[in-house]
Each structure stands twice: as C-alpha cells, then as structure tokens.
C-alpha cells in the first residue's frame, strides 16, 4: 500500500484555535475527516495540532471533562434520536461517555492523524485486540510467540466461537478467506522485528486479514499500513501514554477499511471497553511529546545494545561473565544487510527502545535488577523511566534467564554506567558467597 497522506492533505490549513465556522452536524466517522487535514505536517506538529478543530474554549491546554452524560437540546423540535449536537462545536457532540466523550474524542483525532487511519481507543491493549477479533470474527488465526495476553484473548474466544490458533508460519492451506494473520513487531519480550510485507503477501494470497501489534514501534518508527496491514493495534499504555500512569488500547484500521469504524464503535458501546475521561486527557498530554521521546529512547537503546554486544565479546569482562546473549532488531544482521534490506525500509528511523538480555544462569537474571539504581524493576514499558524485568515474574512462558529492558529518557551513558556497576556488583556478590 502506498503513501496515505497525499489525497487527504490537499491544501489543508491550520485552524485558528476554535471550531470550524461551518462544521457538519453529525459525527464524521470516515477517514476523510478534520482529524486527517494536517498529515502534510511533521509528526510533532500533528500531535500538537491535530485536535485543534475540537477547541471550543480559549484555553491552550485541553480541559479535562469528567462528566459521563451530556444535556440534550432544550428545544423539543431539535431532538434527534442518538444525536445531540453541541451548538458551540458540532464536532464535539456527545450523549453518554460509553459512546463518546470530549477527551477521548480529542485523543482519537490525534491518533487518526499520526497513525494514518481512523482510530478508536479502548480501556487497554487487550480490550482493543479483543474488539478487533470480535469484529473480524475469523475461524482461524495465525500467530507466533509474543505477548502472552493476546494468546489469552484467543483462548477465550476459542471457547466461545471455536476460533482455532495456528502457527504464524503455517502453510497457506491451513488458513482461509476471512481468517487473520496476526504479527507482533518488534516482538515482545525480545525486541526482534518481523517482515510485514512478507506476511501481507501471504494474507493477500489467502484472502486473510493482516493485523499488526505495533506497540513496540509507535510513530515515527513504523507505519504498518505502508506494508499492507489491514488493521493495527497498540497498547497505548506504553509509548502513547509514555509516563506509566494510564491504561489504554488503540485500534486503527487501514483507510480502505474505514467502514469498519461504525460497527467497531457500536460494538465498543456494548462491550463496555471504553477509555476513561482521565485516561483520555492523559493520552492527549502524552502524545504532544511522542516523537521526541520515542526517537531518543530508540537512539539510546541502540547505543546500549552496541555497548553490551561489544563488551560481551571481551573475554573476562563483567558483561561477558554474566550475559549469554543480547536480542534486539538492530542485531538482525541478515535482515539489515544490503540496500534492499526489508528491515531498514520498514523501520528507517530506529529499531525500538526495547531489547532483551539472556543471562548464563537463572540466578543472575533474578538478582541483577536489584543491583541497578536507574532502572526500576517492574513490568510494562514505554515510560520516560527505564525499566528492567525478570520476565518470568509476569510471563510463565518465558525462559527464566531472560530480562526485558525498556529504555527511558535518562541518557544512555548514565544507563550504561548503571548496568556496568550492576554487573560488577553481581559478580562480587557471587564471589563473596
């Protein structure tokens, strides 16, 4: 699929900070909406201004609306079923927060702009994945390793619908029209990337849908629609939130599937997996700095990975004594070789801020996090603070020697020094005992 921005950004202009003079009186759920009018601008300009058309107040920072319900028009002649136009700004019209609400509407406007497809928010990444599978309702889904929670959703649906799970790299004959190929890239928890164009071609041959979990590679690192994805999900808890203080899920559909948005919205209403107003407000605040956060985190992650690999090759170094392997998309040498490298094309702006460490024994993996000062030992990822997790704490399917690292914005040299002293402290502790 080619660039999606050209036709939607013809002669667009920034609004003056208030609602359009003549907005439509009904909610526009198609991709051709005001949320797409700034896609000719930089990513950061979009994250800061894509929701300007929803401004109904002179405040620069968006207000937080906590109301769950909204007054109908006092004129009986103006009452319309399932509609409640706001005369101050019809784009910002609401009835009940399980349907739509001001803060989540603004967040979805920004996401629609930067993700290059109509987007809906959910209460968590797993609720977004669940909603997407409910909409598509496949008979079979091809999936590899990756996040264990998505496998849990599939098992739940298999009990209800008979959904069958097959291997990601299964033969074409094991899938049929309307089935799903679900690709997570980069992969949780190791940070390795997968070739989306390869799986898009497979899906096209079969008549299946390609869905992508791009949580580990938010803008500006990856645009799955350029490589043939039909729908993309994110755990917005991670990089969209960016501050370890909100749960959020996002489903974005390719513009060619914009007709999915209306039924997805209707199904979200009855599934009840709606994003809260506080979380919507936090998401807007966080997206304003998405580009500068993610670029720095990805850059610093690659620097740390390079340092770790170089130290791993030095016989007798602290890193060499503790670690067996480092995994990250930037280390996929075969996939990065040559000008025609699919990985360089797919991720031209960096390979993601998450990587994994494999220690030589389980005890070292368990004890290393306690020696670190700048890394918090905690699950999740994507925040401004660096995290490390002995992954078996939250994922029973993981090897007990695996540590997942999420790089924050502290500065890679400080993180390097913290890791180095932790390796030395661990070795000293082992020697003393």
Image: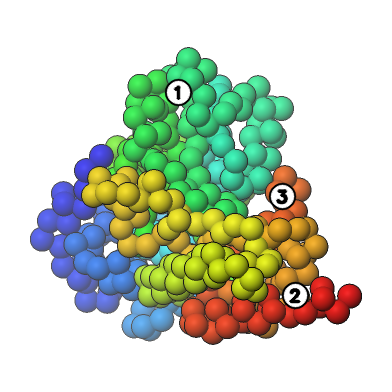
User: CA gap, disc 3 to disc 1?
Assistant: 34 Å
Indicate whether 368 appears above or below 391: below
Label 3: few (<14), some (14–19) or many (≥20) C-alpha neighbours in 10 Å: few
User: CA gap, disc 2 to disc 3?
Assistant: 21 Å
**Which of the 4 image quadrants contains residue 313?**
bottom right
Position of 121 with respect to 163 (left or right) is left
Indicate whether 319 appears above or below 342: below
Query: Helix, strand or loop at disc 1?
Result: loop
Q: Nearer the viewer, residue 156 or 316?
A: 316
**Which of the 4 image quadrants contains residue 161?**
top right
User: CA gap, disc 1 to disc 2?
Assistant: 54 Å
Residue displayed at 59% across by 45% down: 146
Are the residues tagged 3 and 1 within 8 Å (C-beta)?
Answer: no
Q: Earlier in the sequence, mark 3 or mark 1?
A: 1
Position of 334 with respect to 428 (left or right) is left
- What mark, if any, has residue 427 been given in the picture? 2
**Which of the 4 image quadrants contains residue 1?**
top left
Q: Farthest residue in the left direction?
A: 11
Label 2: few (<14), some (14–19) or many (≥20) C-alpha neighbours in 10 Å: some
Q: Earlier in the sequence, mark 1 or mark 2?
A: 1
Q: Is residue 282 visible in the rendered structure shown here?
A: no
Indicate whether 323 appears above or below 156: below
- What mark, if any, has residue 399 been given in the picture? 3
Residue picked out by circle 1: 178
């Amino acid at each position: 699929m080619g660039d999606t921005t050209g036709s939607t950004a013809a002669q667009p202009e920034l609004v003056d900070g208030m609602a359009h003079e003549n907005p439509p009186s009904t909610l526009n759920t198609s991709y051709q909406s005001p949320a797409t009018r700034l896609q000719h601008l930089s990513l950061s300009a979009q994250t800061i201004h894509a929701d300007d058309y929803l401004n109904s107040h002179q405040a620069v920072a968006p207000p937080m609306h906590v109301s769950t319900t909204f007054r109908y028009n006092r004129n009986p002649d103006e009452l319309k079923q399932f509609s409640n136009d706001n005369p101050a700004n019809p784009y910002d019209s609401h009835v009940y927060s399980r349907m739509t609400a001001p803060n989540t509407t603004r967040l979805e406007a920004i996401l629609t702009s930067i993700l290059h497809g109509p987007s809906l928010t959910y209460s968590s990444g797993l609720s977004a994945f669940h909603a997407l599978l409910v909409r598509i309702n496949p008979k079979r889904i091809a999936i590899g390793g990756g996040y264990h929670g998505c496998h849990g959703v599939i098992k739940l649906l298999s009990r209800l619908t008979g959904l069958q799970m097959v291997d990601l790299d299964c033969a074409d004959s094991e899938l049929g029209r309307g089935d799903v190929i679900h690709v997570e890239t980069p992969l949780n928890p190791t940070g390795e990337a997968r070739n989306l164009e390869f799986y898009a071609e497979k899906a096209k041959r079969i008549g299946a849908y390609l869905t992508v979990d791009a949580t580990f590679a938010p803008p500006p690192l990856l645009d799955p629609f350029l490589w043939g994805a039909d729908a993309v999900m994110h755990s917005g808890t991670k990089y969209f939130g960016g501050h370890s203080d909100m749960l959020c899920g996002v489903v974005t559909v390719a513009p060619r599937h914009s007709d999915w948005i209306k039924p997805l919205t209707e199904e979200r209403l009855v599934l009840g997996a709606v994003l809260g107003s506080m979380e919507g407000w936090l998401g807007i605040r966080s997206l304003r700095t998405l580009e500068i956060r993610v670029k720095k985190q990805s850059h610093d992650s690659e620097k740390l990975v390079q340092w770790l690999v170089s130290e791993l090759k030095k016989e007798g170094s602290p890193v060499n004594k503790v670690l067996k392997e480092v995994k990250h998309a930037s280390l996929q040498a075969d996939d990065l070789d040559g000008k025609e490298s699919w990985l360089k094309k797919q991720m031209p702006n960096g390979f993601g801020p998450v990587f994994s460490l494999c220690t030589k024994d389980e005890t070292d993996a368990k004890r290393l996090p306690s020696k670190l000062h700048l890394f918090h030992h905690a699950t999740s990822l994507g925040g401004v603070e660096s995290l490390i997790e002995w992954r078996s704490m939250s994922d029973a399917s993981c090897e007990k020697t695996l540590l997942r690292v999420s790089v924050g914005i502290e500065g890679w040299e400080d993180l390097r020094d913290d890791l180095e002293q932790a390796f030395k402290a661990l070795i000293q502790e082992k020697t003393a005992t």
